[in-house]
Image: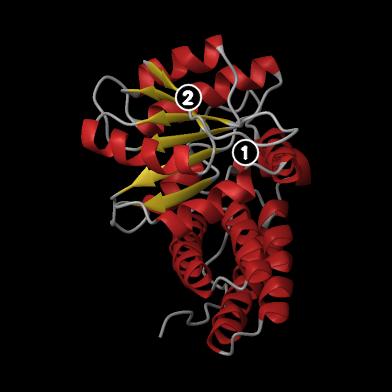
Amino acid sequence: MNEIKTNETRPNEEKKRVLLVEDNIVNQKVAVLLLQQFGLDVVVAENGLLALQSVQKDTYDVILMDCQMPEMDGFEATKAIRRYEALQNRYTPIIAVTALAMVGDQERCIAVGMDDYISKPIDRYVLNIKLNHWLQKEFVLRNQELARKYAQPSGLQSESEYDPVNLTELRDYYGEDLNDVLKTFIESTSNYILSIKQSISEHDHESLARYAHELKGSSASVGAKQMAKLALYLERAAGLRDWKEAKDTTEALINSFDSVRAFLEKSPTLSSEAVILPIRD
């Protein structure tokens, strides 16, 4: 693990520290050069296990996490880091750095506790936007609160951690009769997504932010954790008027909703009478 200092200084401001988790030496050097140019201090960990050890010894302002690595990949490392930080009452933003292009990969990054993602090869402009966002304390605190809110209680282990909705948890909160609530969620979400797609096509950032905010709330209410987090990112993209990010996040949101809907329709909790509206072109 190598700590690389930049000579660039920021008046009256401590340098931010980045943990770069990357096993490819060329990718390491490219990323370090970019991060140094942004005036950041960098520590490099060659795999997820070393990243976890580094987080246990020191604190960082943000982590750039490669997904595919030997020893411990980025997904397992993120879960381990989140478990450790929960015990320490700490929270470090984790940005996935991924070349993955399969359906569901973005949702998987979010499901394990990552806060954002950036594609390989790294684009300097996009990286700058992501870092500027996650180095702001207000956004870190917001996601720390989300992590606490969505943390699965230790006693609820009967369902897979990858289930898109924890029905046991919902029944504990609301009782056994969930049919009407979940049917309403499916119907309203279908309408929200249609409205979101229209807002993006019209570049209407105010409507997009409003619909994303509403969907974030309703998703959180029924325990659709991945959807709630994706809706949060969509709301942020609307505020930044980042239409590419909005389109990509909407596609991930639709994929996540497809998983939630399929899961609910297979469960005895939801009858087959739910109205399903088309959400794809």
| Front residue of this view, candidates 104 and 275 | 104
Q: Which mark is residue 168?
A: 1
Numbered marks: total: 2
Instruction: Report if the CB atoms under discs 2 and 1 are less than 8 Å apart.
Output: no
At x 50%, y 64%, the residue is: 249
Q: Residues within 10 Å of mark 1 (few under 14, many from 20)?
A: some
Checking the image for residue 5, the label placed there is 2
Residue 157 against residue 266 in the figure, above or below = above
Q: Nearer the viewer, residue 219 or 92?
A: 92
Horizontally, residue 114 falls left or right of residue 119, namely right
Residue shown at 37% from the left, 39% from the top? 33
> Is residue 242 in view from this perspective?
yes
Image height check: is 84 above or below 39? above
Q: Earlier in the sequence, mark 2 or mark 1?
A: 2
Residue 218: give x, y in percent of width and height.
71, 61
**93 or 280, which is in the foreground?**
93
Q: Residue at x 69, y 55 (%)?
A: 178
Tell me the CA gap for discs 2 and 1. Answer: 49 Å
Quadrant occupied by the C terminus: bottom left
Q: Quadrant of residue 183?
A: bottom right
Q: Is residue 268 visible?
A: no
